[in-house]
Image (cartoon, rainbow, N blue to C red):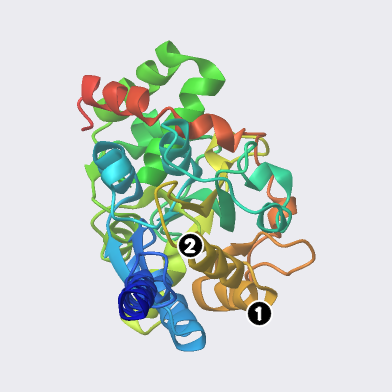
Amino acid sequence: MKTVQKRRLSFAALAIITASLLAGCSPDSSTESKELTIYSGRSETFIAPFLAAFEAESGIKLNVRYGDSAELAAQILEEGENSPADLFLSQDAGSLGAVAEAGLLADLPAEIIAKVPTRFASADSKWVGVTGRARVFAYSPERVGQLPSSYLDMTNSRYQGRFGIAPTNSSFQAFVTALRLANGDGAAEQWLRALVANDPKYYEKNAMIVEAIENGEIDLGLVNHYYVFEVAKALGREISVKDGFFADGDLGNMINVSGAGILATSKRGDAASTLIEYLLRESTQKKFVADTKEYSLLDGLAGPTGLPALNEIAAPAVDLNALRDLKATQELLIKVGLL
């Protein structure tokens, strides 16, 4: 009898050891949490140095898939609960909102949401802004004598065939979404059709528009403010292209954010939160301003040199939470022939 009991105890001990070993191999283990899969709508040029610095500091390996924010949002929506992503870094709030509306983003910790002003975070704590960016028109001072005072002016014949847009880019789509919400679908369609009739040149990315202005292919274009700096940095020299702001309150001055959200299906939420906290750290935010010329969203931090402070930009009030209706915007862009 004692021998049988000893064997039972041995088997029980073995079961406990085996269970412990298996637990150590589970997705929630510390080993697995040292790795994150990121879908990044932020361009590799901008965000890769920051992610590399985080990897070195945290020891967490980052597997990054780069692409356009709107396209990655559509990919996440298609993958649903089977998405391998832990974290979605987006170039704009609209793409994050579309994923959040589908119930695919987890609640962020309150201390993360509290780091930025409420207008730069999701109303339901599903995503948080990381950096700020203003919509502007980039232009050649030598070739554009009369500057546009409104986004509406881009349909004026004086700019016919002389300007560029990036209709597949998420930033342009976010602007069109804001336009739809502000003035209605009918007015948005009317402007887009007039824009197409004014013979714009089409580009895949904002940086390509700035390069085209510098090369003399076009004279101006609709972009985010920091692309003039990006192109100059890539070329290793000063360029002649400048940023221009529209008249006070014009929708063309819209301020959007890059941001982050954690996938609801992620088993690595703590590690993903650590990365977001790193991106919102004051020292990291100062580096964003210095290295990429984006705006910090933290109160009290100075903006990029040579540009107005974020709170000095005469931008219209846009509810970033409402920019999630990307599908209707893309359908409209298809209807007018821009997609």
What residue is shown at x 42% (from left), y 20% (from top)? 188
Q: Which one is in front in this view, the residue at disc 1 or the one at disc 2? A: 1
Picture coordinates of residue 325, whole percent (x, y):
43, 27
Q: Is residue 31 left or right of residue 151?
A: left
**What number is the disc on residue 7?**
none
| Closer to the camera in the image, 229 or 95 | 95
Q: Residues within 10 Å of mark 2 (few under 14, many from 20)?
A: some
| Closer to the camera in the image, 43 or 229 | 43
Element type at marker 1? helix
Q: Is residue 200 left or right of residue 272?
A: left
Q: Report the residue that reaches farthest toward the right.
A: 300
Q: Residue 122: in sight, yes or no?
A: yes
What residue is shown at x 50% (from left), y 68% (from top)? 271
- Say which amino acid is labelled 1: Ser
Circles 1 and 2: CB distance less than 8 Å?
A: no
What residue is shown at x 26% (from left), y 65% (from top)? 215
Q: Report the residue that reaches farthest toward the front.
A: 1
Which residue does the numbered mark 2 point to in the structure image? 242
What residue is shown at x 68% (from left), y 49% (from top)? 313
